[in-house]
Image (cartoon, coloured by chain):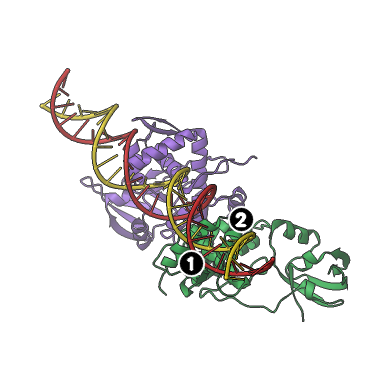
Chain colours: A purple, B green, C yellow, D red
Amino acid sequence: MHKLNFVMTFAEENYLKAIFHLELESQGEVSTNAIAESMETKPSSVTDMVQKLAEKKMLVYKRYKGAQLTEKGRKIAADVIRKHRLWEVFLVEKLNFHWDEVHDIAEQLEHIKSEELINRLDDFLGNPDFDPHGDPIPNEQGVMKRTEKKLLSELKKNQIGICVGVKESSGEFLQYLDKKNISIGTRITVMGKEFFDGSMVIEVQNENFFISKTIADNLYVQTS
Amino acid sequence: MHKLNFVMTFAEENYLKAIFHLELESQGEVSTNAIAESMETKPSSVTDMVQKLAEKKMLVYKRYKGAQLTEKGRKIAADVIRKHRLWEVFLVEKLNFHWDEVHDIAEQLEHIKSEELINRLDDFLGNPDFDPHGDPIPNEQGVMKRTEKKLLSELKKNQIGICVGVKESSGEFLQYLDKKNISIGTRITVMGKEFFDGSMVIEVQNENFFISKTIADNLYVQTS
DNA sequence: TACAACTTTTAGATTAATCTAAATATATTT
DNA sequence: AAATATATTTAGATTAATCTAAAAGTTGTA
C-alpha cells in the first residue's frame, strides 16, 4: 500500500466531493453553475478552482464544457466521503448523537488526514456498509455497496417497504421522520394513495397517517 | 451555558496554544522570538499574528515587550489542549494506537469545532484526567488536575518512583521508553546514580539497566 | 555612555480562496 | 440566421497567513 504523496486542501477536497456527488446524478460533465449552486459559491470561484484541479490532474476540464473527475480525483472524493460517513457512524453509534445532528461535525472530521486513523476507525465500528442515513460507505478502494432501493413514492397501494435511507438529509426532514417514528429499518405499508397529488396514507408501527408526495419522494425503501 | 460567539482560525488557535504552553514555563510575558521558535516560524509572522490576537482581546501585547494571554485567550487555549488530549486518549484507548503515534493526528483533531462533540467524547472515554503521556486534561472550565510529580533525575539512590508522565514526547523518546518497558504506571527503582554526569542505573520489571541524565530529565515520577 | 549584538517590528511580496463586474461564449427563440 | 437570454470565464480586488529584507528598538559591555 503506498500513500498519496500530494496534499489536498480542505477547499480542494470539498470541490472534488461535490463534483463526485453531481456526477452520480447526471452522467457526463458537471457544469460550473451546478457546482457553484451545490457549494453555495460563485461560478467565477468554481472556474478558478476547477482550473487548478485540472492542472493537478484531478479532473478533466474544457472551457465552457464543464468538469469530469479522473480516476485520481474520484479516488480522493470517495475517500473524503468514506471518512465523512464513517465519522457519522461513530457519532451516532458511539457518542449517541441523533442522525440529524451529525452532518456538520462530519463535514469537519472528513478532512482529517491519516489513512491509519480511518482504517482503525472502520474496524472499531465493525466495518459498516452504510451510514446512519442509509448511504453506502466506500471501502478503502473507493467501492461502495449498491442496494436495490426505490422511492417510497413509487410504491402502490398495499405494498410494503423497509426504510433503507433518505434522499434529503436536512435536519428538518430527519426530525419530521423521527416524530413519525420512521428510521432506517422501519417497515412502512402504503394504505392508500391519492392519484391527484401523489400523497399517501401509510402505516408505521400500527399507526396510520397521511404524508405528502414530497415526503414520499425523499424516502428510500426496499421491497421484498 | 453560552457558546463562544467568535470563530478562531486554526492558525489563531495554534498561536494561543503555543503561548499558553510558554507561559507555563516562564512567568510573565512571552517573547516574540520564543513563540517563533516554538512554532517553527519567523518572528515577523509572530508579530503580525500577535497584533491580530491583541485586537481580538485574546492577549495583551506591548510592542517589543511580548504577549500575555487574557482570560478569554487562556480559556480558548485550554479548550484546544483539552480537545487534543481527549482525542489522544481516544486514539490510544479505543483505536489501539501507540502513545508515540498519536500526536500528529491529535494536532488535526484539536481544531474540530463542537462543544457537544467534545463533551460527549469526554463521557465516552470516562472523563479521564490525564492523556496517554501523563499530561493533565483541562475540564470544561479549563481547569486541570495538578499532580505532585518530580523528574526521575531528582531521585536519589534507592528511591522508588512511579512513572506518571514525560516531559518530552517526541516519537524517538517514547519509542526508547517502550523498548525499555517504561510506560505510565511503571515502577522505577534507582539502583545507582553517578555524580559526575547524573547518569543512573535503574530497575524496571526486575531488569537493571543504564540511562543517561537526558533520559532521567524527561521522565516524571511520583514518589510515595 | 556609546557601540555592538541581539530582538522586534515594519514594509512590501506571495499564495490560496474567494468575490464583483465586465467580457465572452453558448443556447434558445423568434 | 439574428437577437436575446443564459452560462462561463477573465480581470482585478480582498483577506488571511506567511515570508524576506530593511529599519527600529533594547540590552549588555567595554
- Residue A132 appears in the figure: no
- Secondary structure under tag 1 reads loop
Q: How many marks?
A: 2
Mark toward the start of the polypeptide (2 vs 1): 1
Give the residue type that dot 2 points to: Asp
Tell me, for residue A12, which label it has, or none: none
Q: Vertical placement of A93 versus C24: above or below?
A: below
The residue positioned 78% from the left and 72% from the top of the image is B152
Q: Nearer the viewer, mark 2 or mark 1?
A: 1
- Residue A203 appears in the figure: yes
The crowd level at tag 1 (other Cα within 10 Å; few <14, some 14-19, many 20+) is few
> Which picture quadrant has residue D5?
top left
The residue positioned 57% from the left and 64% from the top of the image is B18
The single residue placed furthest to the bottom in the displayed view is: B224
Q: Real-space Cα distance between discs 2 and 1?
A: 33 Å
x and y, in percent, of residue D22 in the image: 50, 51
Parent chain of label 2 = B
Residue at the spot of label 2: B104
The residue positioned 69% from the left and 67% from the top of the image is B167
Lateral position of residue B207 relative to residue B182, left or right:
right
Give the residue type that dot 1 points to: Arg
The crowd level at tag 2 (other Cα within 10 Å; few <14, some 14-19, many 20+) is few
Q: Vertical placement of B137 versus A74: above or below?
A: below
x and y, in percent, of residue A192 in the image: 28, 51
x and y, in percent, of residue A220 in the image: 39, 47
- Secondary structure under tag 2 reads helix
* Residues at marks 2 and 1 on the same chain: yes
